[in-house]
Image (cartoon, rainbow, N blue to C red):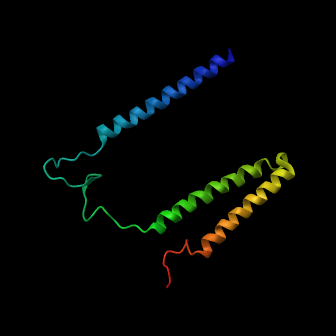
Amino acid sequence: MNMNYQSLCFLVFILFSFFVCFFMLIAGYLLGGKSYFYNIPRPFESGVISLGDARLKIPIKFSLIAIFFVIFDVEALYLYIWSICVRESGWIGFVSICFFIFSLFLTLYFLFKNNILEWIISK
């Protein structure tokens, strides 16, 4: 009987999630800005006519630093999870997290050595 209650709760959760998604889509359609430039193909963003070119030259360094930030942030979450169960993992967990931290430092050393994190490259 407990399994049926859990299934019912899960079904209610899924239905409520779909309802919230559809509500947000419909509310965005009804309340969002509209473009009335039918004959003139101009970019339209948030009710404001865009000025200038939409194709900005963004350096690849920006994307690399953003990707490295996400990677190191996720790895910090692994360290947090390990710190919660440090007693249960024992020496094997300690050795494996030491190897993990060593690989983090090795990656950070590689990034600094190759000047990947610098915005301005000195010649």
Up the image or down, 56 lies above or below 81; here it is: below
Residue occupying the point 61% across, 74% down:
112
Outermost residue toward the right?
A: 91
In the displayed structure, 38 sits above or below 42; it is above
Residue 121: percent from left, percent from top:
49, 79
**64 sits left or right of 112 in the view:** left
Residue at horizontal 73%, vertical 61%? 101
Which residue is at the front of the view, 95 or 15? 95
Of 61 and 78, which appears nearest the observer?
A: 61
Q: Is residue 27 left or right of residue 18?
A: left
Quadrant of the snapshot with the N terminus? top right
Q: Among all residues in the image, which is located at the extreme left?
A: 39
Name the image quarter holding residue 74: bottom right
Q: Position of residue 37 (x, y in %)?
A: 17, 49
Which residue is the extreme one toward the bottom?
123
**Residue located at (63% from left, 22% from top):** 6
Residue under the image location 30 percent in, 52 percent down: 46
83 and 32: which is toward the camera: 83
Q: Is residue 37 left or right of residue 33?
A: left
Q: Is residue 14 above or below residue 84?
A: above
**Residue 42 locus on image (x, y percent):** 20, 55
Q: How many marks?
A: 0
In the picture shown, does residue 6 fall above or below 104? above
x, y (%) of residue 50? 25, 59
